[in-house]
Image (cartoon, rainbow, N blue to C red):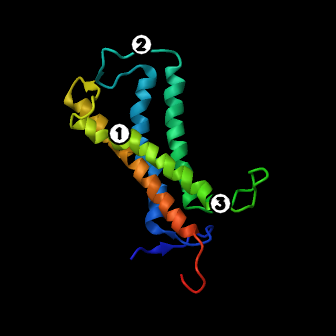
Amino acid sequence: MLMNIPVGDTERPVPRWALRLAKALPFVLLPHCLWRLPFAFDYRMGTVDPAAPAYVWWATPYVFGLSVLTEALALLTLGLVSGWGEVFPSWVPVLRGRRVPSLAAVVPAVLGGLVLFGLFGLQPLAWFGVFDEVGFSNGWWEALYRVCVSPAMLWGPITIALAWAYHRRRRPVAQGVR
């Protein structure tokens, strides 16, 4: 049986596994974000791609922005295990203090999780030759790439699991049954 731990700012206790996954997600995605950063400065990390475009000035802010956005979205999933995911915080104009409709959090989280699975979850198919993959100058670069990028495959499934836990926790409870 899954143990529940009270978080203190949620209406009902958050399952321990959901709390751990939500807190771990930004760290799960960190290697992927760090792998991406050298590309901002035109360092190719051992990739061999003759069709790769030449370095452009906007590559640096784009890659940094993509890494920051990735981490921000990962941190946003904390709302699925926190009180601010159940009641709008005081800094939100017009909505402050009102309950967050359950579907307003669940639907975007599930749709986002499905998109993330489509983006990252199919990566093993490239490893087995179903899709083309960028080549590397040697096996060490390829191994480093896989170690850094592989955890991102979990992003979609973790987000969907957290949305499911949020939905179960927020659904109405029948009288006398808990």
Figure quadrant of residue 29: top left
Mark 1 or mark 3, whichever is nearer to me:
3
Q: CA distance from mark 3 to mark 2?
A: 47 Å
- The one nearer the camera, 35 or 51, is 51
User: Which numbered marker is on residue 54?
Assistant: 2
Q: Earlier in the sequence, mark 1 or mark 2?
A: 2
Q: Position of residue 164 (x, y in %)?
A: 48, 61
The amino acid type of the residue labelled 2 equals: Ala
**Quick check: marks 1 and 3 in contact, CB under 8 Å?**
no
Q: Position of residue 28 (x, y in %)?
A: 41, 48
Residue under circle 1?
A: 149
Q: CA distance from mark 1 to mark 2?
A: 23 Å
Density class for disc 3 (Cα within 10 Å; few <14, some 14-19, many ≥20) is few
User: Which numbered marker is on residue 101?
Assistant: 3
Mark 3 or mark 2, whichever is nearer to me:
3
* Dot 1: element: helix
Residue 45 visible in the displayed image: yes
Figure quadrant of residue 148: top left
Point out the image quarter for the N terminus.
bottom left
Is 40 positioned to the left or the right of 134 in the image?
right
* Dot 2: element: loop
Q: Earlier in the sequence, mark 1 or mark 3?
A: 3
Q: Position of residue 11 (x, y in %)?
A: 62, 71
The amino acid type of the residue labelled 3 equals: Pro
* Dot 3: element: loop
Q: Is residue 178 above or below residue 169?
A: below
Is 140 positioned to the left or the right of 65 in the image?
left
The amino acid type of the residue labelled 1 equals: Val
Residue depicted at 36% across the width and 17% down the height:
52
User: Which numbered marker is on residue 65?
Assistant: none
